[in-house]
Image: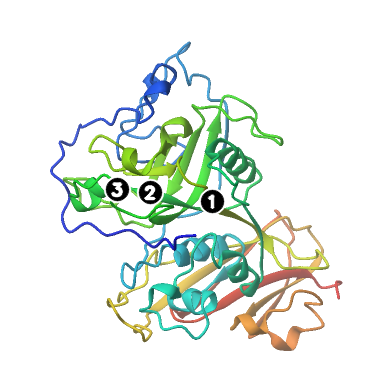
Amino acid sequence: MTQPFAPRFPRSPVNLQPDDRLAPKLQTRRSVLEALSVIGIGAALSRVSPGLAAPSAGEPGSALREATTNDIPARVQWNANFGYCGEVSFIQAGMYYGQYVSQYDARGIATPGVAQNREGSQLLIGVNDSDTAARMHLTAIAWKPQTSPDPVSFLTWVKENVALGYPVVTGLYTNSYKFDGSADPDAGKDEYDHIVTITGIQSRSTTSIPSTYLEDDLLTIEDHGIWTNPGSTVPPHFFTFPVGTLQATRQQANAPDAAVYSLASDTPNYGIAITGVSDTERVTLPVRLTSSADSETPNMPDNGTTRPASKSVTLTATVSKLTQGVEYNLYRYASMAAVPDARFNANAAKAAEKTAFTITSGTTFTTSVTIASSDVAVFRAVPASSS
């Protein structure tokens, strides 16, 4: 496998007209997807993307009735050292399940002992993603690439896992013309240039298992803020595509009228679904983390190998699916090495903090903690009666 890397970041945007619309890349699908042409801009799945025309009744793509939008906020990556896109995707997945690490630590977990200015230090899908998930005490299912390109099977797998509520991480081509102004149709990597988090799916068919692939299924990704539309200073972060137009060859992906991102149709795809936390006894309750900051500043300098200075960040942990009157313990661990995968109460001494609580109304419990952005914070909530 040719080792991919994060994209080449734009020196300056190509001078495109703000209303420049991108025709579907796959001409054989134009008749099916005419109403769903994608401009290189995105929006959260809960609203129609600017440039993504809402289909009228009776048109292809109408009655998109089933949707899953997973609660994964936007997050900004460091662009230095080949880009920290894989690391940020895993940070997002970790926060979805109640744990936070910095980009510096995420890369250190992915490639222990490797200097972060080396290309081989990256967290890459299809290379070290499963091992990284295990070291982060996360459970995961990696897509096993087919011997020949099969984006339809891959996108069906993505649809199923997003519908199950899992963060899915994958690699996409970036449009070298739009990012770099490159006229080389072969510019970029053979497999993917950039790693993104898939946050939502919308479909005319059921999103239950087994799923059915439809070309006008709408897929939403979060790109970690590396693209900003011409004429704007604010990255959109979220991009919504019909999956039929998302697929492209390397040359199609680089075309001036192609979308900002494409999924490889000419080489096997790579992806991983993060399915939960390591818990062999299955006693943990869901914990979701939000942060007072969506980025880490100052940025890692290019070719840097030491951790940038940290800043204070407030994390809010919300425990859900609780039962009133039941006693629970919420543990916060300050290192990955301290996190147990079982017997959480018996291993209470490993935690940096323990919060005992009982709710008398509702089904959730919320608490906040302020830490340095360079700290590790892993939360696990369990019944006080468990081992």
Question: Residue type at mark 2?
Answer: Tyr
* Residue that badge 2 annotates: 173
Q: Position of residue 368 (x, y in %)?
A: 54, 71
| Residue 21 falls left or right of residue 279 | left
Q: Is 125 situated above or below 58?
A: below
Question: Residue type at mark 1?
Answer: Asp
- As drawn, which residue projects farthest toward the top? 58
* Residue that badge 1 annotates: 71
Earlier-in-chain disc, 3 versus 1: 1
User: Label 1: how many residues lie within 10 Å, few (<14), some (14-19) or many (20+)?
Assistant: some
Q: Position of residue 91 (x, y in %)?
A: 50, 66
| Residue 104 falls left or right of residue 361 | left
Nearest the viewer among 55 and 153 is 153
Which of the labelled discs sits on residue 186, or is there none? 3
Q: Is residue 41 among what the camera can see?
A: no
- At x 21%, y 32%, the residue is 20
User: Label 2: how many residues lie within 10 Å, few (<14), some (14-19) or many (20+)?
Assistant: many
Which of the labelled discs sits on residue 366, or is there none? none
Q: Is 125 situated above or below 315?
A: above
Disc 1, SS: loop
- As drawn, which residue projects farthest toward the bottom? 349
Q: Is residue 327 among what the camera can see?
A: yes
Earlier-in-chain disc, 2 versus 3: 2
> Rounded to the nearest whole Å, what is the CA distance between mark 1 and mark 2?
25 Å
> Rounded to the nearest whole Å, what is the CA distance between mark 3 and mark 1?
36 Å
**Looking at the image, do the residues carrying marks 3 and 1 touch, with CB atoms under 8 Å apart?**
no
In front: label 2 or label 3: 3
| Residue 199 falls left or right of residue 6 | right
